[in-house]
Image (spheres, rainbow, N blue to C red):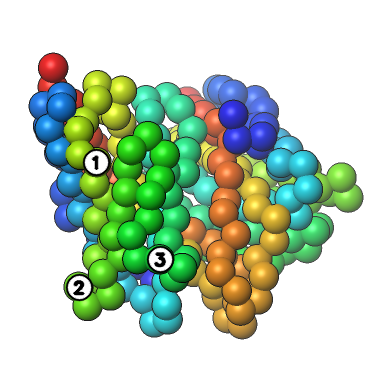
């Protein structure tokens, strides 16, 4: 158990709908990362938040957005869903990315499997 | 830009024989490298990480990896495979971004390890 929790575990919805995925980081971790795992794209970085602020953006669609709340949990919002958005969405957390030093380890949650019908 | 290439998409070994999963990296600075494992329908678990302290890195479950700068490689090995090692393995490099403000992970395409009895 990594200490990172994600809800829900599974989500089935229809095209055009909107869903919210939730992530609670490990106790004490300030950074939250979102990744998408799909059959055709593999594992891709979507977005990172650090202590409530957006820190880095990857291949995240404009239909997707995220935020990190004062209690450090994060939500990933996916709207106008398409069939191709079906994937496993992972959240990871780390203490914080310290400038100029070695990389903090990221610990991954169990993922949310999204199926768009 | 940071990237990793996993040279084999599938590797099959017999139980009790050595495991070798190959990974080459590309990095514009001294990289931070990781191996993660994903068991079927499970999340991502960190096996080991390299952050320039020692070139031979020992991880969990008997795995180790050697960082070879001259060959830009970070191959994962285990002396004796166990049935429980059957899983997908990802070689990962950290991308610190501009000014080291982030450490988003760039994943390889994965190697599926099968262990035959």
Q: In which quarter of the image is the C terminus of chain B?
A: top left
Residue B71 drawn above or below residue A83: below
Res A107 → quadrant:
top right
10 Å crowding of disc 1: few (<14), some (14-19), many (20+): some
How far apart, in angstroms, are the residues tagged by discs 2 and 3? 16 Å
Do the residues marked 2 and 1 share a common chain? yes
Q: Name the residue carrying label 3.
A: B54
- The disc placed on residue B71 is 2
- Residue shown at 81% from the left, 58% from the top: A52
Instruction: Tell me if residue B107 can be seen.
Output: no
Do the residues marked 2 and 3 share a common chain? yes
In the current view of this chain or complex, which residue is farthest to the right? A70
Q: Residue B4: percent from the left, percent from the top?
A: 31, 63
Count every numbered label the image shows and give the total.
3
Apparent side of residue A70 relative to residue B15 in the rendered image (left or right) = right
**Residue nearest the observer in this picture, A36 or A104:** A104
């Amino acid at each position: 158990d990594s200490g990172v929790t994600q809800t829900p575990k599974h989500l089935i919805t229809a095209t055009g709908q909107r869903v919210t995925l939730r992530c609670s980081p490990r106790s004490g971790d300030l950074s939250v990362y979102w990744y998408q795992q799909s059959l055709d794209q593999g594992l891709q970085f979507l977005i990172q938040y650090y202590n409530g602020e957006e820190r880095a953006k990857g291949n995240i669609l404009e239909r997707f957005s995220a935020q990190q709340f004062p209690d450090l949990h994060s939500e990933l919002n996916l709207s106008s869903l398409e069939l191709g958005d079906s994937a496993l969405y992972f959240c990871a957390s780390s203490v914080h990315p310290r400038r100029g030093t070695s990389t903090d380890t990221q610990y991954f949650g169990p993922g949310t499997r999204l199926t768009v019908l | 830009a940071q990237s990793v290439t996993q040279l084999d998409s599938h590797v099959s070994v017999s139980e009790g024989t050595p495991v070798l999963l190959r990974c080459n990296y590309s990095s514009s600075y001294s990289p931070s490298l990781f191996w993660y494992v994903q068991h079927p329908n499970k999340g991502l678990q960190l096996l080991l990480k390299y952050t320039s302290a020692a070139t031979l890195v020992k991880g969990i479950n008997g795995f180790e990896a050697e960082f070879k700068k001259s060959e830009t490689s970070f191959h994962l090995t285990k002396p004796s495979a166990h049935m429980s090692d059957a899983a997908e393995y990802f070689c990962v490099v950290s991308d610190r971004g501009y000014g080291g403000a982030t450490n988003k992970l760039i994943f390889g395409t994965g190697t599926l390890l099968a262990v035959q009895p």
